Image (tube, rainbow, N blue to C red):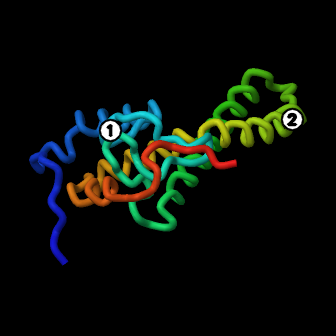
Amino acid sequence: MSNPRRLPQDEAAELSTARAWRIMSRAARLRCPNCGGDRILDGWFALAHRCPTCGLVLDRGESDYFLGAYLVNLVAVELILAAIMVVIGIATAPDVPWTLLMWGGIVFALVAAIACYPWTKVLWLGFDIMLRPVTHEELALGREDTRAVSPTRHA
């Protein structure tokens, strides 16, 4: 099995801080972490099959690829929720509104998990691209794919 060729970058640039910021800032804006192209979301809960600009296949070839994104989403929402609850608890002590915290926490966890979902999925893709840079072969396979280039809505 041959080693796939890397995109033209020197080894030092592959792990540079500037490259990491560029990739993650693109992902935070819900753009393709590889090229910065838009329209990579196919609705709120799904990515398009591939980037319409560079052709990168967005699931990167593994059936359980986005389990990490689910984990990041869960951990981020729970950390934010815990911080909010601690602040409210300290601010309202000694009369902490436990019922409000319980029901508000449940509602917040559900809403925040749904609201953060697209970002965690694209940020996970960006993190993967930082660690496993996109190859010429990977982009070529994406461009040869016969599926629709632009995201489509499914009824």
Q: Earlier in the sequence, mark 2 or mark 1?
A: 1
Label 2: which residue?
A: 98
Considering depth in this image, is 69 or 89 the residue closer to the camera? 69
- For this orientation, the residue located farthest to the right is 99
Give x and y (percent) for residue 42. 56, 43
- For this orientation, the residue located farthest to the top is 91
> What residue is drawn where x is 32% and y is 38%?
23
* On screen, residue 36 above or below 56: above
Give x and y (percent) for residue 124. 45, 48
* On screen, residue 89 above or below 137: above
Amino acid type shown at disc 2: Trp
As drawn, is 100 to the left or to the right of 149? right
As drawn, is 83 to the left or to the right of 58? right
- For this orientation, the residue located farthest to the left is 10
Q: Residues within 10 Å of mark 2 (few under 14, many from 20)?
A: few
In three-dimensional space, the C-alpha distance between marks 2 and 1, rounded to whole angstroms, equals 41 Å
> What residue is drawn where x is 26% and y is 52%?
133
> What residue is drawn where x is 86% and y is 35%?
98
Mark 1 residue element: helix
As drawn, is 54 to the left or to the right of 46? left
Number of marks present in the image shown = 2
- Which numbered mark, 2 or 1, is in the foreground of this view? 1
Considering depth in this image, is 23 or 7 the residue closer to the camera? 7
Q: Residues within 10 Å of mark 1 (few under 14, many from 20)?
A: many
Q: Quadrant location of residue 97?
A: top right
Amino acid type shown at disc 1: Ile
Considering depth in this image, is 61 or 154 the residue closer to the camera? 154
Label 1: which residue?
A: 23
**Figure quadrant of the N terminus:** bottom left
